[in-house]
């Protein structure tokens, strides 16, 4: 699916986040950046037959931005960016020593029930960025979705007090609860001009809808 790495001189927390992502994106690999340039990373991803390169950027010790790049020797290009409020690592949720998914299976992206149109739009965007498959939630159960699409891993877009969040399920590990990492997103931007930001969404609400 994708090669995952970080900006130069990452913190321990950022490296841990990269390893967590490797465990929820099927067939992906976390690679220590070292002194590799962007061109080096693109060539590494291409040589390993990955279609995506994901770079996690750091600010003040924490992951701030996720940059997704299309890997194609004839058409390299930035796909989009997620700007983060924060993350919660798998070990902070209570899950350790989860193995990466080496078997071939899709990453299915859906939403929690009773979310807004912004969440549905972001679920579609997240599927585009990751090369996953967007599946509308409707009244389906999460277990019903993974059974239908023959996968163990599910990404769910949820409500969050400061924007929206991405959480991950591994049904081969835990049948009922997400394993993380939990990613809180405040802004997403696509290279084709589509975008969303939490502050802008707040301004669109009527004054009576705003909560302290």
Image (cartoon, rainbow, N blue to C red):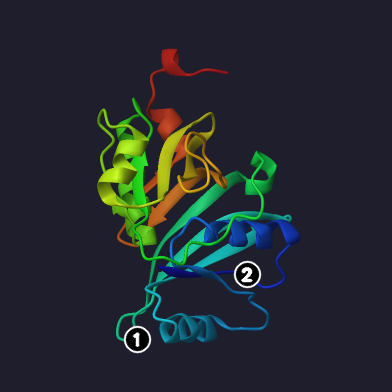
Quick one: label 2 or label 1, which is nearer the N terminus?
A: 2
Residue drawn at x 59%, y 74% is 31
Residue drawn at x 74%, y 62% is 11
> What residue does disc 1 label?
73
Residue 172, percent from left and from top: 47, 48
Residue drawn at x 48%, y 19% is 210
Image quarter hosting the N terminus: bottom left
Where residue 141 is drawn, which disc sits there? none
Q: Is any part of residue 59 visible from this angle? A: no
Residue 14, percent from left and from top: 67, 59
Q: Label 2 neighbourhood size at 10 Å, few (<14), some (14-19), many (20+)? A: many
Dot 2 falls on a residue whose secondary structure is: loop
Q: Is any part of residue 208 visible from this angle? A: yes
> What residue does disc 2 label?
7
The residues tagged by marks 2 and 1 sit, at their Cα atoms, a distance apart of: 22 Å
For residue 141, above or below residue 75: above
Lateral position of residue 105 relative to residue 45, left or right:
left
Residue 175, percent from left and from top: 47, 38
For residue 78, above or below residue 38: above
Q: Label 1 neighbourhood size at 10 Å, few (<14), some (14-19), many (20+)? A: few
Residue furthest to the top in view is: 208
Question: Between 211 and 58, which is closer to the camera in this rendering?
Answer: 58
Residue drawn at x 67%, y 63% is 15
Dot 1 falls on a residue whose secondary structure is: loop
Lateral position of residue 210 relative to residue 71, left or right:
right
């Amino acid at each position: 699916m994708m090669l995952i790495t970080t900006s130069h001189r990452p913190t321990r927390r950022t490296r841990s986040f990269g390893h967590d992502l490797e465990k929820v994106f099927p067939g992906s690999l976390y690679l220590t950046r070292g002194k590799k340039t962007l061109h080096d990373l693109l060539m590494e991803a291409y040589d390993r037959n990955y279609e995506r390169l994901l770079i996690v950027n750091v600010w003040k010790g924490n992951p701030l931005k996720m940059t997704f790049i299309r890997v194609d020797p004839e058409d390299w290009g930035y796909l989009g960016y997620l700007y983060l409020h924060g993350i919660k690592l798998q070990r902070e949720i209570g899950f350790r020593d989860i193995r990466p998914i080496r078997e071939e299976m899709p990453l299915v992206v859906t939403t929690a029930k009773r979310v807004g149109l912004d969440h549905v739009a972001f679920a579609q965007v997240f599927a585009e960025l990751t090369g996953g498959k967007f599946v509308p939630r409707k009244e389906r159960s999460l277990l019903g979705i993974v059974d239908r699409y023959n996968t163990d891993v599910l990404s769910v877009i949820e409500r969050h007090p400061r924007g929206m969040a991405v959480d991950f399920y591994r049904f081969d590990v835990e049948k009922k609860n997400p394993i993380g990492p939990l990613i809180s997103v405040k802004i997403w931007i696509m290279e084709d001009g589509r975008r969303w930001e939490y502050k802008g969404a707040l301004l669109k609400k009527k004054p009576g809808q705003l909560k302290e």
